[in-house]
Image: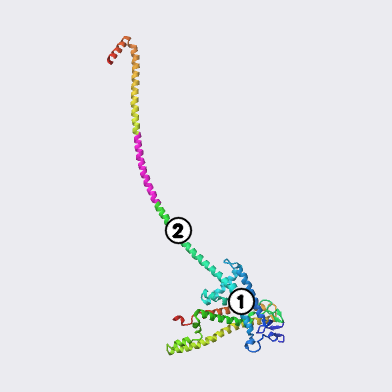
Amino acid sequence: MSNIAYAAEGTTETESADTGVLASLGINGTLFTAQLINFTIIAGILWFLILKPLTKKLAERQKMIDDSIANSKKVQENLAKSEQHFQQRVDEAKVEANKVVERATQEAEKMGATMKTKAKQEIELLVDQAKRNFSIERDEMRAAVKTEAAEMITVALQKILAEKMTEKKDKELIAEMIKKME
Amino acid sequence: MSTLHIPPLAPEVIFHVGRFPVTNTMVNVWLAMGIFLGMGIILRRSLSLRPGKLQNFFEYILESVLGYFDQVTGNRRQTIRFLPISGSIFFFILLSNWLGLLPGVGSITFNHELLLRSANTDLNLTVAMALTSVIVSHLFGFFTVGVFTHLNKFIQLGTIAKSFRQGPIAIFSAVIEFGVGIIEIAGEFAKVLSLSLRLFGNIFAGEVLLTVMASLFSFLLPTPFMLLELLVGLIQAAVFAILSLVYMTVMSSAPHGAEEH
């Protein structure tokens, strides 16, 4: 045990460490005050430089997360509302479109019928006109044929008569004709 | 076998500044102070909502500690309210305990005395912290439940005065409660004693253990004990901080019966 050195025996004890339990434990007024001040400074450094800024940042981040979650919920609700609104509008548009198509079909049918009637009338008018034209042309042709036939007959008669009639007979006939005409 | 230098109970004075003695435990406290100051300055500069590696590390530790503290206080608001004391106590004790395990502590000498010694082997420091913790717990009590309500937990004169209107049984129970209050006052002193002596005893014993092991065989033998001391340092820091937190929580809650009215 000779090599065991108790440091307390050889050290300069603090000023008040003479006797008593507190002194034997190293409790000393000056050192206690100094350590109290040291601890206060450390607590201040820890709180103001490390713990407070960190807790503040944590709280800020937590608030940001909470706000984001609340916002995302709001956005989702708005989206659902918008989708519902959109669907409602689409349904309304579909109904409206069906109505428009129905109305268009009806109008088209009506217009078709009208046009059909009009076309019929026009066709009838054209047919009538064609008939009339045809009849005029027929009459004209008939008249022309008649004239032509008369001329041909006349020519033919002239030829026939030229061979069988004498000049004398001819003059008599002309004279008779002139007489009749008078 | 090397010379066994068993550390004394009192911290060793290594030099004087005027008449003021500077002890080796105080040097360790200043070392811890410097480390915290450096860390604080670096952290404050790099603090942002999108944390970097350093901030992430500190936030992880703080979140873990806050989680344990929440279990004691019951809610995060209370935890943050008590954090300046409980958090400071926890981190300071932890760092100074672990600083005491660094090479050089207990071996470098100055003026024929050890230059560095674990801060919590100084009873002055542990008493200072315990006293601060208990006094602050009472201050929280004063501000939270009111001065008279808080004082009535210890000196139950109000209860005695009320009991006179309620009959002999009430008077009897008030007298008993008055006695309990006196015991509570003694308990407050016991809190300071138990907090300070527990921390001092554990860390001092660890230091003595490491010294003995190192002097028996310097290589590898102290290693498992150093690992043990790492754990002891953490446990003691947690115990001191959580007990302080318990005292603050209890003191800032309304006394029994107050909420019934």
Res A42 label: 1
Q: Residue B132: x percent and y percent? A: 58, 81
Magenta-highlighted residues: A97-126
Q: Nearer the viewer, residue A59 or A153?
A: A59
Residue neighbourhood size for the residue with mark 2, other residues' Cα within 10 Å, grouped as few (<14), some (14–19), many (≥20)? few
Q: How is the image coloured?
A: rainbow
Left or right placement of residue A176 versus residue A88 in this view:
left
Front label number (2 vs 1): 1
Q: Residue A123: x percent and y percent? A: 35, 36
Q: Is residue B250 visible?
A: no
Left or right placement of residue A10 versus residue B163 in this view:
right
Q: Nearer the viewer, residue B12 or A41?
A: A41
Instruction: Using the image, determine if residue A89 lies above or below residue A33.
Output: above
Query: Callout 2, which amino acid?
Result: Glu
Q: Main secondary structure of the magenta part?
A: helix
Location of residue B203 by image quarter? bottom right
Query: Callout 1, which amino acid?
Result: Ile
Identify the secondary structure beneath mark 2.
Answer: helix
Disc 2 designates what residue? A83
Identify the secondary structure beneath mark 1.
Answer: helix
- Residue at mark 1: chain: A
Q: Is residue B33 visible?
A: yes
Location of residue A92 by image quarter? bottom left
